[in-house]
Image (cartoon, helix red, strand yellow):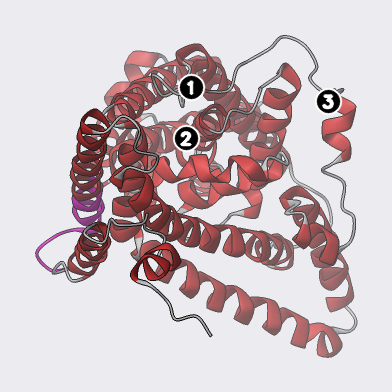
Amino acid sequence: MTAFSGNDILRFLGISEGQGLRLLGVAAFFIMLAMLSRLPKKKFSFAARVLMGTGAGTLFGLAVWFIGKAELSANPSLQMTAADDLSFWFRLVVHGYLSLFVCLVLPMVFLASIRLVIHTPAEKQVSSLTRWKKRVNTGMMAVSALIAACVGIAFQVGAIPGAEAGTFQWSMVNGEGIIDLAYGLIPSGLGWDLIRANVVGLFVFGIYVGIAARRMSGKYMDTVKPVFDLVDGAFSVGTSVCKTVIAYKPMGAAAIMAYLTARHGAAVVWALLKMLLALCVAAVLMLVVQLVLSTLGGVSPAAFFRAGNVAMKKALKTRSGSACLPEAQEALAVGLGLNREVTDVVSAYAISSGMQGCGALFPAMATVFALEACRVTLTPGTVLILAVVIALMSYGITDLPGTATMAEFAAVLGIGMQEAVPGLGAMIAIDPIADVPRTLINVTGCMANAIFVERMVRK
């Protein structure tokens, strides 16, 4: 029996031969993660802790990148630099963290779709209000997704300078036309859809299960009551797991930025800044669309801003759409003098099931970023399917914590691009900053929807 040598042990630990000192870098990395996990929650907000993780990971990764460049300059024949060795450990943590979101999205969308149906009050005859709020909500989500995707393509978000990136082509690639893309969204069985991460298929099947359960509840409530309880219980447990995984974001952001900067250096930082700039541009364009919608509803842009001033300022400060809902509803009913019974229903519906910023604008641009970063070619068919998937998923992620994060994973998986999931990691690192413009669009969106629907119902 041959005994392990020192180099054998290093290779086992993913370190190049004769480079035992690099184990100190691995140890420092995990110490950094442990320190981030112990940041006092009372002293630092969650957003602050995520940004601290982003900053720490960026600095750590840049230090490793510079060391790797220095090693290569000193020895051009060196095959594996410190950046190469440590990146394996960084990638391990990143892959593990992102995989948790993939594991959560699939069953949670299925449960949320069933729950959405069984908890929706049954109407013998669908009212005009119900029809209009759903039409406007779905349409605005699709428009928001299309705007973000087009702006993301124009800015080439995800294209890291010096690294190969995906491209956009005005042609079909590998025969992927609209029919081929739509074919992949059709349910193929619960087990098979879970295996191939067909989020849309799970959502559609869940809707049918919910319809069947609610239909039977009229005469056989005692029989289907366990199903209702099982869905609610499973959803509550899943929600708790989501909160736990989201709580790891400071460490996840640190690992993600350490991995990206160790591989690409400061170019990653510039790519993320460009992503945030593109998101702000898309938010402005979407706000223009919302103002057009409110104008069609009889409210001028000046009146819109004057009435919604308080809600908008609060959105920028709190970064929570639900927290701003009372101010938005007050602006609609008192500031604009609209029918409160209608506007309260529509605005609450839009905040829960139609967040145009967190549920459409950001996920669409994050998807483009991920596809570009993972060198996947985009086509017009991909963009169109993306808008459809996001519009549908807005109902499938209702009441889930971390809506924007869950929505971006659902979007990438929904268009059948599982290979682009690693590209979503960088979005976790900038999530607190991106939350500002997207929350504003959530609030202005719920107001615009309510204004337009109130006008249509009034007619």
What is the magenta range? 41-54
Q: Which quarter of the picture shows residue 264?
A: top left
Distance, label 2 to label 3, CA atoms, is 25 Å
- Indicate the secondary structure of the residue bearing disc 2: helix
Residue 53 placement (x, y as % from top left) = 23, 53
Q: Label 3, on which residue?
A: 176
Residue 375 placement (x, y as % from top left) = 58, 28
Q: Is residue 106 left or right of residue 151?
A: right
**What residue is shown at x 59% (from left), y 58% (from top)?**
102
Above or below 411: residue 387: above
Asked if residue 5 lies in the magenta stretch, the reply is no
Query: Which amino acid, by three-letter code, is at mark 2?
Result: Phe
- Label number found at residue 362: 2
- Indicate the secondary structure of the residue bearing disc 3: loop
Q: How many residues crowd around disc 1 within 10 Å: few (fewer than 14), some, or many (20 or more)?
A: many
Q: How many residues crowd around disc 2 within 10 Å: few (fewer than 14), some, or many (20 or more)?
A: many
Residue 456 placement (x, y as % from top left) = 64, 27
Q: Quadrant of the C terminus?
A: top right
Sequence-wise first label, 1 or 2:
1
Q: Label 1, on which residue?
A: 290
